[in-house]
Amino acid sequence: ISSGSLHVPTTAKSNGTCGEKSARLIVVWSEDDDSKAKKLTAPSNVTLNDKQPAIDHNILVFNFVNDGKIATLDSVQGSIFMDPIHFPNPA
């Protein structure tokens, strides 16, 4: 097992949804170059699951719930593209 840091660039795109009881923040970015990252969009209906096809960008989804008094982070989902520069020998 190894550890590392995840850096979200300033070129990342964001989107989200808000409701009375829940909210979602979606952040999308690419690792390869700024021009590609600027072309990415963050769709508001992203869901991550094991059947999702391979993608060449990174997605973080933050799900919040609101009990009427305070909003709290309920869950975080992520899909990180294992590019050969940052992940030279993926297992």
Image (tube, rainbow, N blue to C red):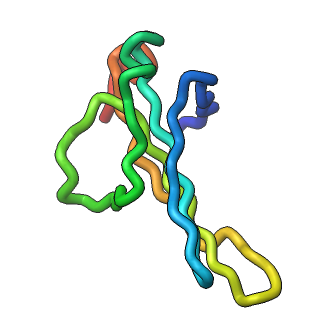
Q: How far across and how far down the image is residue 73, in percent?
A: 67, 69
Q: Residue at x 72, y 73 (%)?
A: 72
Residue 32 lies left or right of residue 75; in this view the side is: left
Q: How far across and how far down the image is residue 43, in percent?
A: 37, 49
Q: Residue at x 21, y 39 (%)?
A: 54
Labels in figure, total: 0
Q: Eyeballing the image, is 72 above or below 53?
A: below
Q: Quadrant of residue 63?
A: bottom right
Q: Eyeballing the image, is 65 above or below 18?
A: below
Q: Quadrant of the C terminus?
A: top left
Direction right: furthest residue:
69
Residue 31 lies left or right of residue 50; in this view the side is: right
Q: How far across and how far down the image is residue 74, in percent?
A: 61, 73
The residue nearer to you, when weighing 40 against 82, is 40
Q: Residue at x 51, y 34 (%)?
A: 13
Q: How far across and how far down the image is residue 24, in percent?
A: 54, 63
Q: Quadrant of residue 64?
A: bottom right
Q: Residue at x 50, y 55 (%)?
A: 61
The residue nearer to you, when weighing 60 against 82, is 60
The residue nearer to you, when weighing 29 against 42, is 42
Q: Eyeballing the image, is 76 above or below 1?
A: below
